[in-house]
Image (spheres, rainbow, N blue to C red):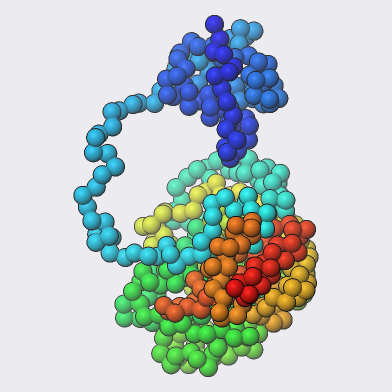
Amino acid sequence: MPIPAETFFLDPTFEGTLQHQLQRMVGDAILAGRLRAGDKLPSSRKLAAHLGVSRITVTLAYGELVSGGYLRSSGRSGYFVSEAAPRRDSFEASPKAGRSVVDWNRVVGQRGIGRMMPERPADWRKFPYCFIYGQVDDTLFDHRNWRLCALQSLGRRDFAATTGDHFERDDPELIKHISLHTLPRRGILARPEEILTTLGAQNALWLCAQLLLNQRRTAVMENPGYPGLRAILSQTRCAVLSVDVGRQGLRLENLPERADVVFLTPSHHCPSNVTMPVQRRRDLLRLAAERGYVIVEDDYEFEMSFENPPAPALKSLDGDGRVIYVGSFSKSLFPGLRLGYIVAPEPFIREARALRLAMLRHPPGHIQRTVANFLSLGHYDALVTRMSHAFKMRREVMARAIREHGLMMDEADITGGSSFWMRVPEAIDTRELAARLRNRGVLIEPGDVFFSGPNAPRSFFRLAYSSVDAARIPEGIALIARELASMRAG
């Protein structure tokens, strides 16, 4: 007698396709022992009718479970739980499970690093006016070609490259494309021996900090600046000097006479999007040569320059080999990709590769080859073009709405990036503003986490447009303006 179809129910909160949910549902029941060897599953027609899904969805799910050894097909008789189906071992939980007598606050030593990063709710996609930075827009991404490139990377021809443990080198196809196509667009010439892949820019910055800094050295970073870098520098125990950023980027007149490493984002400053002019970049390199600085250039979002072509990278102007370049595909493809790269002189790359080996060996080969395929077939360039057009339109819509409602932008002559850097009267706390707006379906990022020191200003916030539809922007800005007016009146 078959298991009744009414045994199964769909979970509306499941994140995935209906087919995957059906596979998970049946597989979990078998692993837990609720379905036993020889039990007959409901027919695809009955289960589809009960769940309100198509019959082909059930058939495909059953087929995958057969391939995985959970079910067996018996011709016209239907599907049965396989005698060889896996089982989940069960152990009686200890009465002390979950308890710990260790004082972990004392053992760990360093605390509070996580609080340095901007906060965002896990269910941000459910908010109608999501102005959170760095999230992907599903409607712009090339799902079909990405899937084809991933399948290609898993084919027989690429199997060795994607499944091997190649810690001594990176995917040659990816490195080749970065060297011959990506870097020349930034004016950079580099040999394969001068390039190292990383798990995104964050991992690249961590590797640089670990190799260049210690308790006796000094690092300079922008203020406001990337909070993820501040978290990294705090772990090196080096001295950190924060230098203010003006309308043309880092204020060179405030740079200290003695420092070891300068970290900066010259293409689009984080978070204001200010672009450092070429002449100021030359002046910075001159100062670095005179004072012995090493520079780490985080060149994120250089593709998102709408009105003017992107300025040449700082590293392309470097004649002394003192600039370490950090790039990333995570912003332009999707943040969950976690794939970036470092470009630096070969001795540095050799040490960085050894440190990466000790930490994570290498980024997954499947990801490296999938990205290599996506780049080499031209899909990446098409995606960036599509994103640039969409972001330019959204920026124009948002800028117009900001002006109409009298909000203050703390920037001038910004022609790219994917966000606005905003400010409010000092009497208003943007953390309180963010909390109020969240109840109205609006998400913004308070700006205090970008500043150094215990008395970070609470009068800044960031508005991003990478994942919000242009049609929703005016109403979202109107809600922000109304809430600000309410707080002023209060």
User: For the point 59% across and 53% down, which residue is it?
Assistant: 124
Q: Position of residue 352 (x, y in %)?
A: 42, 65
Q: Nearer the viewer, residue 295 or 460?
A: 460
Q: Identify the residue at image location x=64%, y=62%.
A: 131
Looking at the image, the residue that sits furthest to the front is: 490
Q: Is residue 269 above or below residue 120?
A: below
The percent position of residue 367, horizontal first and vertical second, equals: 56, 49
Total marks shown come to: 0
The answer, for residue 293, to whether it is visible in the render is yes
* Residue situated in front as seen by the camera: 478 or 77: 478
Q: Is residue 346 left or right of residue 108?
A: right
In the rendered structure, the answer to whether residue 258 lies left or right of residue 196 reads left
Quadrant of the frame with the C terminus: bottom right
Residue 377 to residue 24: above or below = below
Q: Tell which of 230 and 14 is nearer to you.
A: 14
Give the quadrant of the N terminus: top right
In the rendered view, tell whether residue 475 sits above or below residue 460: above
Residue plotted at (67% across, 47% down): 146
Which of the two residues, 210 or 306, is positioned nearer the viewer here?
306
- Residue 466: give x, y in percent of width and height: 67, 61
Answer yes or no: is residue 295 visible.
Answer: no
Most extreme residue toward the left is 101
The image shows residue 41 at horizontal and vertical percentages of 56, 14
Q: Residue at x 36, y 69 (%)?
A: 235
Q: Quadrant of residue 32?
A: top left
